């Protein structure tokens, strides 16, 4: 049986190129030029040469032999890039210039969004941008993504809204990533959603704390009433108990706790009857 290594040695001795594709004929520029003229008779010299150069580059990048996932992706990506270059060229020819939000504009947008995130009525990203860049550019910028969102979120980490969101677990790395990967309008909307949840969670925390304080006060009042009842049932007046305990060196607080009276009531009585 012939092993793979022996088979490769045999191919090498026979002069075959191991692992190499079959040789292709060189790119025919004349035929390519004729094809370009036939398909685009209005093209001028420089444009025709550019088109032929692109065809040659695509030809040289093509893989001879069995198709692979990588070769298919490269072939189609090459076509896409060529189409984008052609589109950009045509847009420049008619005077179109792309408009993208600057780092300062994105920071101003997100600062205003943080300032208003906890309000009952909040402006959309488009409304904020109208005030910042004007009516003409606002709709376009609102629907585009921006690489400056991440930097803006980092700079606003100490904003009160950001601190509240972080305290309530609504400004994790995943939350910030979700905000930053959206368009400007989507990022502001995602910020508002998380601010809403953080505000509700903070409200629940405050309510729970208030309820805990009320329960503690009720328990203290109940304990005092039970103590007063115990003193009354023992047949002793709390005045007598207070005098005895004070003579034994007890503090006003200890006497108040033992008799179920308020500390001020105990101190006032003992001072009057000292």
Image (tube, helix red, strand yellow):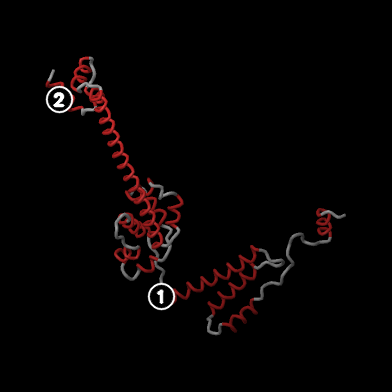
Labelled disc at residue 1: none
* Image location (x, y in percent) of residue 250: 24, 18
* Image location (x, y in percent) of residue 272: 12, 21
Q: Residues within 10 Å of mark 1 (few under 14, many from 20)?
A: few
What SS does tag 2 mark?
helix
The CA span between labels 1 and 2 is 91 Å
Q: Residue visible at 62% across and 81% down?
A: 35
Q: Residues within 10 Å of mark 2 (few under 14, many from 20)?
A: few
Q: Quadrant of residue 21?
A: bottom right
Give the left or right position of residue 118, taking residue 151 as reference: left
Task: Give the residue at mark 1.
Answer: 95
Give the left or right position of residue 267, taking residue 65 as reference: left
User: Which numbered disc, 1 or 2, marks the residue closer to the eye?
Assistant: 2
Q: Residue visible at 23% across and 25% down?
A: 232
Q: Is residue 173 above or below residue 129?
A: above
Q: In the picture, which quadrant includes the N terminus?
A: bottom right
Give 175 or 136, whichever is nearer the viewer: 175
Q: In the picture, which quadrant includes the C terminus?
A: top left
Give 33 or 165, whichever is nearer the viewer: 165
- Residues tagged 1 and 2 counted as in contact (Cβ below 8 A): no
What SS does tag 1 mark?
loop
* Image location (x, y in percent) of residue 118: 31, 54
Q: Is residue 45 above or below residue 196?
A: below
Task: Give the residue at mark 2.
Answer: 268
Q: Residue visible at 41% across and 47% down?
A: 169
* Image location (x, y in percent) of residue 192: 36, 57
């Amino acid at each position: 049986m012939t092993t793979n290594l022996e088979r490769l040695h045999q191919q090498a001795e026979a002069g075959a190129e191991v692992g190499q594709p079959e040789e292709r004929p060189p790119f025919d520029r004349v035929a390519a030029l004729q094809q370009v003229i036939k398909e685009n008779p209005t093209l001028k010299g420089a444009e025709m040469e550019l088109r032929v150069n692109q065809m040659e580059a695509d030809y040289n990048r093509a893989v001879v032999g069995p198709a692979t996932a990588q070769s298919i992706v490269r072939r189609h990506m090459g076509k896409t890039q060529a189409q984008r270059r052609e589109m950009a060229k045509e847009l420049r020819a008619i005077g179109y210039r792309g408009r993208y939000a600057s780092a300062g504009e994105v920071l101003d947008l997100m600062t205003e969004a943080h300032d208003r995130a906890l309000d009952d009525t909040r402006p959309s990203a488009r409304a904020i941008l109208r005030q910042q860049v004007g009516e003409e550019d606002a709709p376009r910028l609102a629907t585009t993504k921006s690489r400056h969102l991440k930097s803006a979120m980092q700079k606003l980490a100490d904003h009160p809204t950001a601190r509240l969101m972080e305290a309530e677990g609504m400004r994790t790395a995943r939350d910030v990533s979700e905000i930053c990967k959206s368009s400007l309008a989507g990022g502001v909307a995602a910020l508002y959603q998380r601010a809403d949840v953080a505000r509700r969670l903070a409200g629940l925390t405050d309510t729970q704390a208030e309820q805990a304080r009320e329960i503690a006060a009720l328990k203290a009042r109940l304990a005092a009433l039970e103590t007063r009842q115990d003193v009354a049932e023992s047949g002793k007046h709390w005045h007598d108990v207070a005098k005895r305990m004070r003579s034994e060196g007890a503090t006003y607080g200890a006497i108040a706790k033992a008799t179920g009276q308020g500390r001020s009531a105990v101190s006032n009585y003992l001072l009057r009857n000292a």
